[in-house]
Image: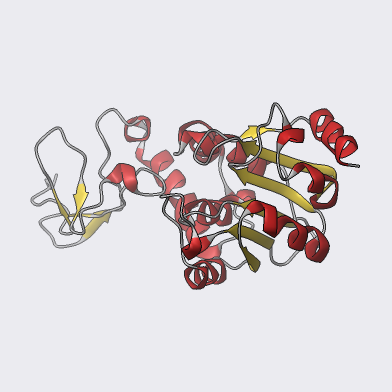
C-alpha cells in the first residue's frame, strides 16, 4: 500500500499538537466550518482523497471515510449553490450543523434554517458578513421562491462600536455572490427600523444580533415595530448584545410587545 510521502502542499504546521495553519496564517478553527479542506498527494503524484486535516480530537476525524466525504460534500455544495441546500443533506451532515458547527451562538439559527423553509429573512447586525454566508449555505426556500429576499441592517463603515463591520459596498458584493435578492439598510436600529417596516413589511425569519433582550422584547427600540416586521408565523431570534447566543423569542412575549407598542 502506498504511504503518504508529503504533507499538503498548501499547509505548514507550527508544532505537533497545534492546529493546521494555511499559508495565509488562518487556522482551521477560524474557517466557517472549523475544518480545512485539503488533498494528500501520494508518491504516484495523484490526489488520492480530499480528506481534511483535522484538529486533534475532532469528532468528524473519527468517522469512516465515506461519512466524512458526505459531510464535506454537503458543505461544498452549500458554498457553490447558495440556496436549497438542505434538501440534499444527509443525516450526518445535519448532525454536524446542528450540534457541532461554530459559532455555538448561531446553532439555534442553524436549526431553524434546517427545519423551516422561508422566503424572506431580516438580519439586524450584519457585522463581517459571516452569518450571511452561513445562511446561504443552509437556507431552505419555500416551493414558490426562487431567491431569498434578504434585508440587512447595519451601520457598516459608519459603525463606532469597535466591532468589525463590512462596508456597505462589500456587503452588497457578498449578498450578490451568495445569490440573495438583497436590500441593505445603513444606520442604527432606531433610524433603520421605520424604513424596514414601511418599505419591506414582515419577514419569515428575523435575526437580531444585539438590541433586543429575548426575555424583555418590549424594552427594545425594535418593540414598536415588531408588529410590522413580523407576521403571525415569523420566527424571531435575538440577543441583548452583539455576539451573544441567539435565542428564540417566544411568540407570547412578542405579542405582548405588540400590544405595548400599539
**Residue 97 seen in the current view:** yes
**Front residue (pair 46, 185):** 185
Give the side of residue 71 with respect to residue 44, left or right: right
Give the side of residue 120 with respect to residue 92, left or right: right
**Front residue (pair 57, 246):** 246
Quadrant that contains the C terminus: top right
Q: Residue at x 70, y 39 (%)?
A: 220
Give the side of residue 72 with respect to residue 221, left or right: left
x, y percentage for residue 140? 67, 52
Is 61 located above or below residue 31 in the figure? above
x, y percentage for residue 219? 72, 34
x, y percentage for residue 181? 67, 69
Quadrant that contains the N terminus: top left
The image quadrant of residue 20 is: top left
**Residue 140 seen in the current view:** no
Q: Residue at x 8, y 50 (%)?
A: 5
**Number of dots carrying numbers:** 0
Is 9 located above or below residue 71 in the figure? below
**Front residue (pair 200, 91):** 200
Q: Residue at x 45, y 44 (%)?
A: 71
Q: Coloured how?
A: secondary structure
x, y percentage for residue 164? 41, 54
**Front residue (pair 60, 70):** 60
Amino acid at each position: 500500500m502506498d504511504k503518504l510521502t508529503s504533507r499538503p502542499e498548501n499547509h505548514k504546521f507550527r508544532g505537533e499538537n497545534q492546529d493546521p495553519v494555511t499559508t495565509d496564517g488562518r487556522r482551521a478553527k477560524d474557517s466557517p466550518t472549523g475544518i480545512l479542506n485539503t488533498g494528500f498527494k501520494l508518491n504516484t503524484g495523484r490526489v488520492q482523497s480530499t480528506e481534511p486535516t483535522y484538529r486533534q480530537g475532532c469528532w468528524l476525524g473519527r468517522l469512516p471515510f465515506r461519512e466524512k466525504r458526505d459531510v464535506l460534500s454537503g458543505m461544498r455544495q452549500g458554498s457553490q449553490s447558495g440556496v436549497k441546500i438542505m434538501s440534499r443533506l444527509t443525516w450526518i451532515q445535519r448532525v454536524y450543523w446542528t450540534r457541532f458547527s461554530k459559532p455555538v451562538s448561531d446553532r439555534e439559527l442553524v436549526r431553524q434554517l434546517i427545519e423551516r423553509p422561508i422566503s424572506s429573512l431580516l438580519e439586524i447586525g450584519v457585522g463581517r458578513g459571516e452569518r450571511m454566508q452561513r445562511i446561504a449555505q443552509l437556507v431552505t426556500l419555500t416551493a414558490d421562491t426562487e431567491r431569498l429576499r434578504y434585508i440587512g441592517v447595519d451601520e457598516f463603515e459608519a459603525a463606532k462600536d469597535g466591532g468589525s463591520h463590512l462596508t456597505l459596498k462589500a456587503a452588497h458584493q457578498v449578498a450578490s455572490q451568495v445569490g440573495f435578492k438583497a436590500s441593505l439598510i445603513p444606520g442604527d436600529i432606531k433610524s433603520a427600523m421605520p424604513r424596514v417596516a414601511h418599505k419591506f413589511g414582515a419577514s419569515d425569519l428575523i435575526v437580531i444580533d444585539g438590541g433586543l433582550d429575548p426575555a424583555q422584547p418590549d424594552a427594545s427600540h425594535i418593540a414598536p415595530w415588531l408588529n410590522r416586521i413580523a407576521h403571525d408565523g415569523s420566527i424571531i431570534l435575538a440577543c441583548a448584545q452583539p455576539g451573544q447566543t441567539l435565542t428564540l423569542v417566544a411568540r407570547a412575549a412578542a405579542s405582548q410587545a405588540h400590544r405595548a407598542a400599539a
